[in-house]
Amino acid sequence: MNNILTYKGFIGSVNFNADDHIFFGKIEGINDLVTFEGISVSELENAFHEMVNLHVEDCKREGKPVEKSYKGSFNVRISQDLHKKAAQAAAVKRITLETV
């Protein structure tokens, strides 16, 4: 089961509201909140494509980045034992864990 749409390198979430009988989603990985919806899968896909195209046009016109910026680092929690093993492996290679 795949609950995402892809188009031009963008990812869109896919959800269904059973009360309203409508599919909806949002473009992921951008700084703005851009949503789309449809009553069928093909309508949802078309709305997603249209909103991606509009988002790209708006960003270019306003001089804003099209995608969210990422620092390239993130914190991960691991066990003490695994941390020790990783630090030892880095020491043997004469590098730091941040280098890896």
Image: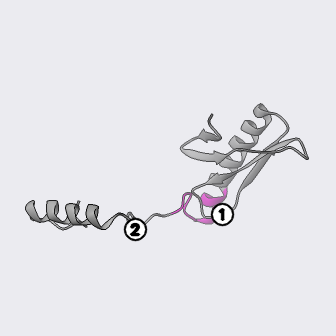
**Span highlighted in magenta in the image:** 58-68
Q: Quadrant of the C terminus?
A: bottom left
Vertical relation: 46 (above or below) 33: above
Percent x, y for residue 20? 91, 46
What color scheme is it? one colour
- Give the side of residue 18 with respect to residue 31, left or right: right
The label shown at residue 98 is none
Residue 38 horizontal/vertical position (percent): 82, 41
At mark 1, the secondary structure is loop
Residue type beneath disc 2: Asn
| Mark 1 → mark 2, Cα distance in angstroms | 24 Å
Q: Residue 97: x percent and y percent?
A: 23, 66
Q: Is residue 31 left or right of 86 when viewed as pictured? A: right
- Please state which of the two labelled residues, at mark 1 or mark 2, is closer to the viewer: 2
Q: Which residue is mark 1?
A: 32
Q: Which residue does the image show at 66% across and 54% down from the upper left? A: 55
Where does the image place residue 75, in percent across and percent down from the top left?
Answer: 40, 68
Q: Is residue 62 above or below residue 56?
A: below
Circles 1, 2 touching at the beta carbon (< 8 Å):
no
Q: Is residue 62 magenta?
A: yes
Decide which of 92, 12 is in the foreground and name it: 92
Count neighbours of disc 2 (C-alpha within 10 A) and say few if under 14, some if 14 to 19, many if 20 or more: few
The answer to which of marks 1 and 2 sits earlier in the sequence is: 1
- List the residue tagged with mark 2: 75
Tell me which corner region of the image, top left, top right, bottom left or bottom right, holds residue 92: bottom left
**As shown in the figure, which amino acid type bears the numbered disc 1?**
Asp
Residue at the extreme top of the image, as rendered: 42
| Of the pair 54 and 5, the residue shown nearer to us | 5
